[in-house]
Image (cartoon, grey):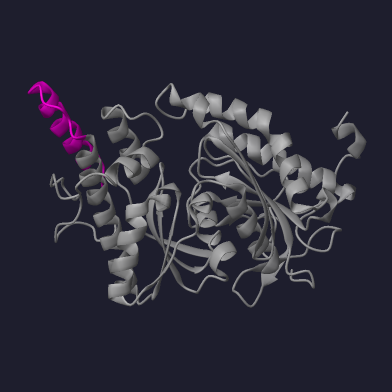
Amino acid sequence: MADSRGGPLVLGIETSCDETGVGIVRGHTLLADAIASSVDEHARFGGVVPEVASRAHLEAMVPTIQRALKEAGVAASDLDGIAVTAGPGLAGALLVGVSAAKAYAYALGKPLYGVNHLASHICVDQLEHGPLPEPTMALLVSGGHSSLLLAPDITSDVRPLGATIDDAAGEAFDKVARVLNLGFPGGPVIDRYAREGNPEAIRFPRGLTGPRDAAYDFSFSGLKTAVARWIEAKRAAGEEVPVADVSASFQEAVVDVLTRKAVRACKDNGVDHLMIGGGVAANSRLRAMAQRRCEDAGIRLRVPRPKLCTDNGAMVAALGAEMVARNRPASAWDLSADSSLPVTETHVPDPHAHSHGDDHGGDHSHGHGHGHGHAPDHDHFHELSKDNLYS
């Protein structure tokens, strides 16, 4: 739904892990990106504790939504839709976000869009660099995912080419940081130490890079173990562990594999754009090596600014706005959180909505009394005063 104001106005809610993100987007323009992080509450455990994350989301949700609306300078009633991460992620954390989105959408009479976390990480680049080329090749690297995805249409057609078979890249950063006693999360601190180290000091293994290995899959478990054993051997010999050199050499091994496979995927599939997203995309060495290798291969690199790479509500709003703009069917009111939602399901449409194809190969939802999407039609619901929702 495009309009004279520059596109649909959509609020996005992201609660897949430990950050409560609320973003507001109009078309491809970011108006607000409010985040409440519970990372400090998890740091003493050395990783994310699901129950702690869920409770933190519950406490932060309403204040974060109010902050985003204020930052954007819009009223909730102005919204054209509400989008929320339906999966993948931590089940309890996702449930808080989905429940909140359903409540707001119902109370406001707006269509609801349950969208895919990974597809959102790709779509957020539209807020930085404009419309995504079709198709787009995306390398998503985070604490939970390392994936190579081909996206002919970000709203309806995302195809997995490869993924991690064990530890994700971000998970390996966290585990190596723990062995080095650098704290949690590991990515930023290893990146910092690596700048003072020699990336060629130690030759750590590059997983799944042999001629018979899967071309686009990733494996970082063996690398993590190799680093841990190297550190243990040093300590057992009574020698000081060169933290900067270990960080730089480990990081180089991860980045080498990620960029090599991503460029290969672009070449093999005839795609001249590469988009990198996810929390690890904030890594300075990954950005630098990807830029060099893409330039050498004649590939245009698109990487959002670091704040948009980590989990945030802006990315969910961006995908939601694209869903509205392309008339994709909204989600049903019985939308549920799906911790293992496959990336091929870019969003969760209402299976009972009447729809027909559009120019993009997707569907138009005919809505129920509110023009577009599946906004509430009180003929089909028990009457409920909206005032009572807030009493």
The reply, left or right, for residue 5 in relation to residue 344 is right
In this view, the residue in front, 138 or 334, is 138
Give the quadrant of the C terminus. top right
Task: Identify the residue at horizontal 24%, vertical 56% (top origin).
Answer: 256
The reply, left or right, for residue 360 in relation to residue 292 is right
In this view, the residue in front, 85 or 352, is 85
Magenta stretch, main secondary structure, is: helix
The answer to which quarter of the image holds residue 319 is bottom right
Most distant residue in the front direction: 196
In the image, residue 1 lies at what x, y percent?
74, 68
Up/down of 97 relative to 124, above or below: above
Task: Identify the residue at horizontal 65%, vertical 41% (top origin).
Answer: 98
Does residue 226 show up magenta in the picture? yes
In this view, the residue in front, 106 or 33, is 33
The reply, left or right, for residue 92 in relation to residue 60 is left
Up/down of 43 relative to 387, above or below: above
The reply, left or right, for residue 234 in relation to residue 154 is left
Task: Identify the residue at horizontal 40%, vertical 48% (top origin).
Answer: 280
In the image, residue 342 lies at what x, y percent?
48, 51
Does residue 74 show up magenta in the picture? no
**Would residue 49 be visible to someone looking at this image?**
no
Magenta segment: 219-242
Task: Identify the residue at horizontal 67%, vertical 28% (top origin).
Answer: 59
In the image, residue 246 lies at what x, y percent?
20, 39
Up/down of 251 relative to 231, above or below: below
